[in-house]
Every structure is written in structure tokens, then in C-alpha cells.
Amino acid sequence: MRHIFSALNRYRFAVIIALLLTLTELAVELVQPLIMARIIDQGVVQQDMETVLFWGGVMLILSFAAFGAGIVNSFYAAHASQNTAYDLRNGLFAKVQSFSFANFSQFPTSSLMTRITNDVNQIQNTIFMSLRIMLRAPLLVAGSVIMAIVVNAQLALILVLTIPLLVVFLVYLMRKAGALFKQVQSRVDRVNNVVQENLTAIRMIKAFTRRSYETERFDGAADELRVKMMRTFRLIETTMPVILLVMNFSIIVVLWFGTTGVNTGGATIGEVVAIINYITRMSGALTVFSMIIMIFSRARASAERIGEVFEADVDLKEPGDPDDDALLFNGEIVFDNVHFRYPGTRQSVLNRLSFTVQSREQTAVLGATGAGKTSLFQLIPRLYDTDGGTVRIDGKDVSRMPLKSLRRQIGYVPQETMLFSGTIEENLRWGNEEADENEMIQALKDAQIYDTIASLKHGLQSTVGQRGVNLSGGQKQRLAIARALLRRPSILLLDDSTSALDAKTEQSLLQAIRKYSCTTIMITQKMSTTVRADNILLLDEGELVGKGSHSQLLRESDLYREIYASQHAVSEEEGAHE
Ligand code: CTP
Ligand code: MG
């Protein structure tokens, strides 16, 4: 709630105006039954036409005033609610941008999306409604009771007894509905999650003909949402009959005692009509109130969910040493007794990892699937922090460097290529906004993808992704390499990026990368890569089991010889088939 109020606080001027205007509307509504009583008692009963016309005129003018106030109020309510929602959304987005990888495993993507869209919408609607009617409904109830007492205290006694009971009932309901709505929002998350997974994996689903399975999964999630929604609304719907029952009962009591009162002189007809008028207004206000409860409980659930994102602890702390900002890496990387496991898991992924990668060398990291190669990479640009030991670049602990200057100098080509929808040029510039066309062409050539791009109808301006050209997995990989090269990084990390290349192209690529004289580490499964590397790190189940050059490892490591023999056997077999 705190975040919502501080966002709303910026528009307090609009909020105050809107609230003052609701008070105008409220005053008119409360005065009307009084005027009605006067018209009846002094005008109608005494057959005084002049009084009827005068007070009738006053009522008309007041109604117009209330109408005008309502329109201006809507304007300011919309202003405050829309702007608050806009600020909240931007705030959430900025917060999510600062998230570490660990934060992302805390909030699934689909849940973040629901929070930034749906939950903020709930808040926006609630602020609008609050400024329009939320304050008016309870004040109308309280004001009606007070006015009824002013008109005739005896007859109003029944209201003094029943209204507090109803209010207690409504507050209880609000508590209960709040808890239910929190569950509803998490079911919305689940539906979005299934949709998101399906849309991203639609090719897989079709290839595996899993459509009916996925449809069932969606049905399941949608059905859970429906059931939760229904249960919540059923609870809320019980309010209306209860309110009407109590209020109608009050009307009967007022009429009963009112009739006696008129006969004995304890009340006038106008007073009875006025009080009944107040009761009907109150019934209306209480019904609106029960609707508000629904909206408000939902908003409270949403506000909590939004608060969770704002309060998420971004565990990667930025050390603020601006002196380092200009620092350029020489590129020596040292792992010193590094331990690592993913946050929230117990299984350790990297153990006692110690090695040095010399500046400007090409190092290959070889290891079976699941050995921890990608995990090792992620520690260098500090996508995760180590659990023990340090990672140092040029002798300086990465956790003491400003993230921005650290990451700016690293070109990271992840295992799964990520291109954004847009042109090829835009995707390249994403690596380095200042790059000119010549630099882009050079980077594409070095990444061995220029010919492919040049042959496209629109060249660099071709769009990729939805409704654009579709590149193969290997082509995307090389485009991602070009994007990383364009950064002119001091350190280049290639996670299995050359797996799709034939030996000759791979050799040209590695040769071209040498020109950039950056420290290069490449994860690979292929001996053809390790043979050409200056240095090899052999990783097995999170431990370093060998390091050195190809010939050195062939001599010293059984595992390396084994891998070499198996790949050799395969390539000889392939050769025999040709
Ligand atoms: N792991 C994990 N949580 C993740 C990613 C990985 O717990 N988000 C664990 C996996 O169970 C795996 C180990 O970390 O056993 C190492 O994973 P990774 O470093 O990704 O292995 P790679 O060597 O990169 O494997 P591959 O060649 O298949 O990419
Ligand atoms: Mg990997």
C-alpha cells in the first residue's frame, strides 16, 4: 500500500479537488430530503403553491450544481488514477530491469507480466472509483444517519441500532474477500503462464503433437480461475440481500412508529417521508459500498503483489566506485577456489574451481552436458555471485566493480541465442549503439555471417523474428557473435556458439576473433575447437579435472584422451561412410 500512496501523493492536488467535489455532491444529496420535507409540510399540506415553487427551484439549482461537480470530479479522478498507474508501471519496469537472475527465479515471467499489467489496472480502477464514489458512499451513510436524527431523533433511533451492525458485517466480508482475491490473482498468473509457455514453444508443441495435452492444461488453469472467481463473487453477492432485508425492515419500523407519531403529534408527514428517503438513499449507498468492497479487496491483493516486486531484495549490490568506471580491462581472469550453487538449491554446481586465463588468449572449456560450463560463465559478468572464493579480473574482485563498467567490457554470447524483433541493424546496435555501418559490416564478416545477410533482399534492414526473415539456429548464433564483437569487448565469452559451424568456418571465425585481441573463452563439445585453443580447461561435474594445451592434456588426462578417442572414432567412421 505504501508504494501506491506515495505514487498517488504526486497527484495530491487532483485528489484533493476530486474529493472536495464529491463533498459538494454529497451535501446536495443530504440536503434534498430536508427540502422535500419542507415542501410537503409547509407547501403541500398547507396548500402554499409559492413555497412549493421556491423550494422546487432551489432543488433544481442544487441538482445542476451536483451534476457539474460530478463531471469535473470525473476529470480529476481520471487524471490522478491514470497518472498514478503510469508511474507505478514505469517504477515496476525499472525495478524489474535491476533484478538479478536470482530475483527472476523468485518471480516467474508470467507473474511479473500480470503484476505490471493486470494488477496495476486494478489499482487504477480503484483509485478512480475511490475518488468518484468510495468516499461518498460511507459519508452518505453516516450523513444520512445524522440528518435523520436532526429531522426526528426518535424515528432515527432504529438506524442508530442497525447501521453499526451492517458496517461490522461489511468489514468482515472485506477481509474474507481480500484473501480470496489474492488467490484469484495467482490463478490469473497461472493462466498467463500456460499461455506464455505455449506461445513461446508453439513449434515444439506442434512437432510433438502435444496440442490436446496443452489444451487440457490450459483448460485446467482457466477452470481453476473460474472456480475461484465464482467463489469470491458468491461471497460478495450475499451482501446485497442482507443489506436490503435490514433496510426494508427499518422502513417498516419507521412507518409503524411514524404513523403513530403523526397521529399523536410526535412527527410530521414530511419528517416521516424525509427519514424514509434517507433510508432508501442509505440502501443505495450500502449496495454501492458492497461493490466497493469487492473492488477494494481486489486492489488490496494487487497492491500487495505490486509491493512484493518493489520490495524484492536485489541481492547483487552495486559497489559505487566511480573511479573504476573508466578503467579498461587488460583481460586476465582468475578463479580462486570458487564454489557455486544456484540460489534456492542445495546441489553445488561448481567446487573448488581455481584457474587463470591469461590476457588475450583463447581458452576452450570442455566438459559433458551438465558439467557446469554455463554456470562458470555466468560468474564472470556477475549474473550470479559466487558462494565462496573470488572471481578476479586484472587482480580485482568482480564483486567490487561497478556492474556497468564490468559488463560493458564483456561480450557474452549465451547458449540460447536471443534476438529481438526488429531489423538486423537494430539487433547489432543493441550490442553497441554508436557503431557505424562499416563497423557493423566488419563485425558480420568476422562472425562469418556477412554473405548470408548481404544476400537477403533488404540486407541489414531485414527484420528478424515475427513476420520477418527466419534465420537458422546457426545463423542466429553468428549474428549474436557479431553483436558481441561490435562491443569491442576486452573479454569475449562464447557459450557453445560455434557448435553449428563446420570446421573450416569455425577456423576462420576464431582467426578473425584474434584480431580483436580480447581474452576469449569458448565453451565447446568439439575437439576441433580445443585443438586450436591456446589453453583448455577440462570440467567434470563442477570440478576442474585438467588444464593445459591440447598436447599436454593428451599426455596427462585420461578423460581428455577418452573424449578425443571417441570423437576421433566418430569422424573416422563418418570418413569411412563417405
Ligand atoms: N542448474 C541449476 N539451475 C539452473 C541451471 C543449472 O540448478 N538454472 C544445474 C543443473 O542441474 C546442472 C548444473 O547446474 O546439473 C550445471 O549446469 P550448466 O552449467 O548449465 O551445465 P553446462 O555444462 O552448461 O551443460 P550444457 O553443456 O548442457 O549446456
Ligand atoms: Mg551450458
Image (tube, rainbow, N blue to C red):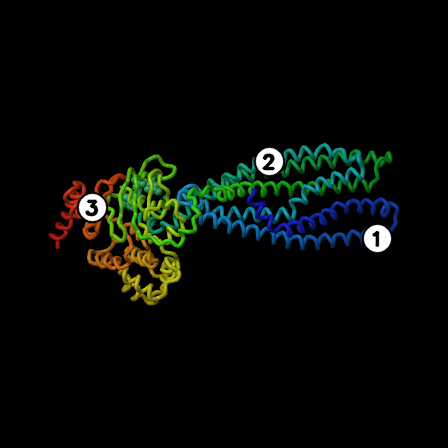
Disc 2: CA contacts within 10 A as few (<14), some (14-19) or many (>=20):
some
In the rendered image, the vertical position of residue 93 relative to residue 172, given as above or below:
below
Q: Secondary structure at mark 2?
A: helix
Tag 2 and tag 3, C-beta contact below 8 Å: no
Q: Is residue 123 left or right of residue 101?
A: right
Residue type at mark 1 is Phe
Q: CA distance from mark 2 to mark 3?
A: 70 Å
In the rendered image, the vertical position of residue 550 relative to residue 449, given as above or below:
above
Q: CA distance from mark 1 to mark 2?
A: 45 Å
Give the quadrant of residue 453. bottom left
Q: Is residue 547 left or right of residue 289?
A: left
Residue type at mark 3 is Gly
Tag 1 and tag 2, C-beta contact below 8 Å: no
- Residue 478 is situated, as x and y percent measured from the top left of the image, at 29, 57
In the rendered image, the vertical position of residue 352 relative to residue 362, given as above or below:
above
Disc 1: CA contacts within 10 A as few (<14), some (14-19) or many (>=20):
few
Q: Which residue is mark 3?
A: 548
- Residue 38 is situated, as x and y percent measured from the top left of the image, at 83, 45
In primary-sequence order, the first of circles 1 and 2 is 1
- Residue 43 is situated, as x and y percent measured from the top left of the image, at 86, 48
Q: CA distance from mark 1 to mark 3?
A: 104 Å
Q: Which residue is mark 1?
A: 54
Q: Which residue is mark 2?
A: 173
Look at 39% across and 52% down and name the residue there: 405
